Amino acid sequence: MRVLVTGATGFVGSHVVDRLAARECPTVILLRQTSSRRFLEAHHGRLEVHEGSLQDPATLDAAVAGVTHVVHCAGLTRALHRTDFDAVNHRGTVRLLDALRRHATGLERFVLVSSLAAHGPASNTLPARETDPPRPVSAYGSSKLHAEEAVRTQCPSGFVILRPPAVYGPRDLEFLRLFRAAQTGLVPSIGGGRQELTLVYAPDLAEALVHCLTHPAAAGKTYHVGAPEVVTAANLAREIGAVLGRRPRFLPIPAPLVPLVCQIAALGARCRRRPSLLAHDKHRELLALGWVADTTRLEAETGFSCPTRLRPGLEHTAAWYRAHRWIP
Ligand SMILES: NC(=O)c1ccc[n+]([C@@H]2O[C@H](COP(=O)([O-])OP(=O)(O)OC[C@H]3O[C@@H](n4cnc5c(N)ncnc54)[C@H](OP(=O)(O)O)[C@@H]3O)[C@@H](O)[C@H]2O)c1
């Protein structure tokens, strides 16, 4: 077994590398010249490193040569321009599949890290099922759905598609904002904080991805993955506050203002030339009733369920943030 992990320098990908290293699995990673290796320091000298980009097909050939399994984590979750999502998440996946077809003749399985955004919003009363017709509400979600379609039709080997909801855990920069807000005691709240959420703890997601690399029943399947608890945005902020020893107050953001806030954030991101999560059509995701996934299919068919409950997952995350001085 020789596993290629794309996006290994990122939040999710670095946890996948940790899981593979724990299994002493020979691992190849694809990273860009500009990629920070700060999350991979523990594996120094034990990974086969290839420089390349999903946007530069010539650089992919060497990285894929001889690999038998792929966990494709690389992708954009924030972008300066809406079209960047498709260029990397969809067309970048197509380029990777092309390279695999030409240079990885022994490929056995390709696991795509998609997103619940490819399905679209769903509430606790009608959680997202893998068999539902997908209705993404953002350019990001559409790009992940198009990547899924490319994998289903063009993958030269067996494949598995996993759709995580919001991922939290050590190394995450997005939940960090919420931790910092909770620490200041004031958390922005949209729609009274009623949005319902399924979440997944990053090490659990990484374990699920590695599990799906070899599980026979997973071949050709799409799975939602996440913890079984559903939490509202307000209760999530309260839980984070409790972990930090705070009782945060809420700063209500009226729903009609949310698109404007996202537009201003997009403009600011373009001026700074640094992509922001709050941009483009993100307001559609923020204003959705919920992002709740039915995760029972993964357990029923492969025996995998996420072991980490919300409170201990948040406690570990806070401890990691503190240890790395990301929060005081
Ligand atoms: N975080 C979440 O809540 C969440 C939820 C659902 C799904 N996902 C999916 O999980 C995957 C990983 O997300 P993440 O949160 O770990 O994001 P992240 O921390 O931003 O990591 C993204 C990774 O992709 C790499 N990458 C980006 N563009 C690339 C390109 N053109 N060529 C090669 N590599 C490229 C990045 O490399 P650099 O280090 O060079 O930037 C980085 O290693 C994505 O596919 C995302 O859609 C994430």
Image: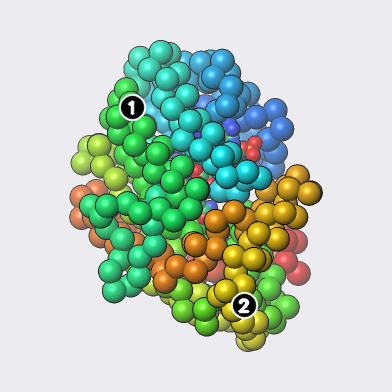
Residue drawn 43% across and 13% down? 103
Question: Which residue was labeled with disc 2?
Answer: 253
Q: Are marks 2 and 1 in contact (CB under 8 Å)?
A: no
Does dot 1 land on a helix, a strand or a loop?
loop
Q: Quadrant of ligand 1?
A: top right
Say left or right for 126 vs 79: left
Query: Which image quadrant for residue 181?
Result: bottom right
> Which image quarter is the C terminus in?
bottom right
Question: Which residue was labeled with disc 1?
Answer: 155
Question: How are the residues colored?
Answer: rainbow
> Which image quarter is the N terminus in?
top left
Q: Is 243 drawn above or below residue 168 in the view shown?
A: below
- Visible in this render: residue 79? yes
Does dot 2 land on a helix, a strand or a loop?
strand
From the top left corner, tell me how far across and down residue 249 is, in percent: 64, 86
Say left or right for 186 vs 29: right
Please tell me which residue lies in front, 185 or 261: 261
Q: Residue furthest right?
A: 272
Residue drawn 33% across and 26% down? 154
Query: Distance between the Cα atoms at labels 2 and 1?
Result: 44 Å
Tell me which amino acid carries mark 2. Answer: Ile
Tell me which amino acid carries mark 1. Answer: Cys
Q: Is mark 1 within 8 Å of ligand 1?
A: no
- Visible in this render: residue 307? no
The nearer-to-camera label among 2 and 1 is 2
From the top left corner, tell me how far across and down residue 237 is, in percent: 56, 77
Residue drawn 71% across and 32% down? 34
Q: Is 57 drawn above or below residue 306 in the view shown?
A: above
From the top left corner, tell me how far across and down residue 303 is, in percent: 25, 52
**Nearest to N terminus: mark 2 or mark 1:** 1
